[in-house]
Image: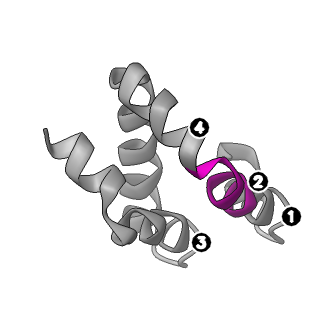
Amino acid sequence: RCAEILLKSPKFYNLFKYMTLPHFDVVSDAFTTLKELFLRHRMLVASFLITNYDAVFHQFNQMIQSENYVVQRQT
């Protein structure tokens, strides 16, 4: 239920912002949250991605193009 609430919230996209902050602990928690969300709730995330594919992968693309090697590597 929490995963569904997070995915339906506009605040979901804040995770991508948190992954680019200079604070290691925040970055680490954001990456872990996204990873666990995507791996544990596959069916829920699959339907979410069908609807929000462009917005989510736009965020991933920005992270891949980041100047920060750690952010690129984790993405």
- Which residue does the image show at 53% across and 77% down from the upper left? 21
Neighbours of disc 4 within 10 Å: few (<14), some (14-19), many (20+): few
Of the image marks 1 and 3, the number of the one nearer the N terminus: 3
Answer whether labels 4 and 2 touch (C-beta < 8 Å).
no
**Label 1 sits on what residue type?**
Gln
Q: Which residue is identified by label 2?
A: 72
Percent position (x, y) of residue 68? 76, 67
Quick one: SS at disc 3?
Answer: loop
Percent position (x, y) of residue 20? 59, 72
Structural distance between the alpha carbons of marks 4 and 2: 24 Å
Image quarter (top left, top right, bottom left or bottom right) of the N terminus: top left
Structural distance between the alpha carbons of marks 1 and 4: 23 Å
Of the image marks 3 and 4, the number of the one nearer the N terminus: 3
Answer whether labels 1 and 2 touch (C-beta < 8 Å).
yes
Q: Nearer the viewer, residue 33 or 43?
A: 43
Quick one: SS at disc 4?
Answer: helix
Of the image marks 1 and 4, the number of the one nearer the N terminus: 4
Q: Which residue is identified by label 4?
A: 50
**Label 4 sits on what residue type?**
Ile
Left or right for 61, reference 35:
right
Q: Which residue is identified by label 1?
A: 65
Q: Which residue is identified by label 3?
A: 20
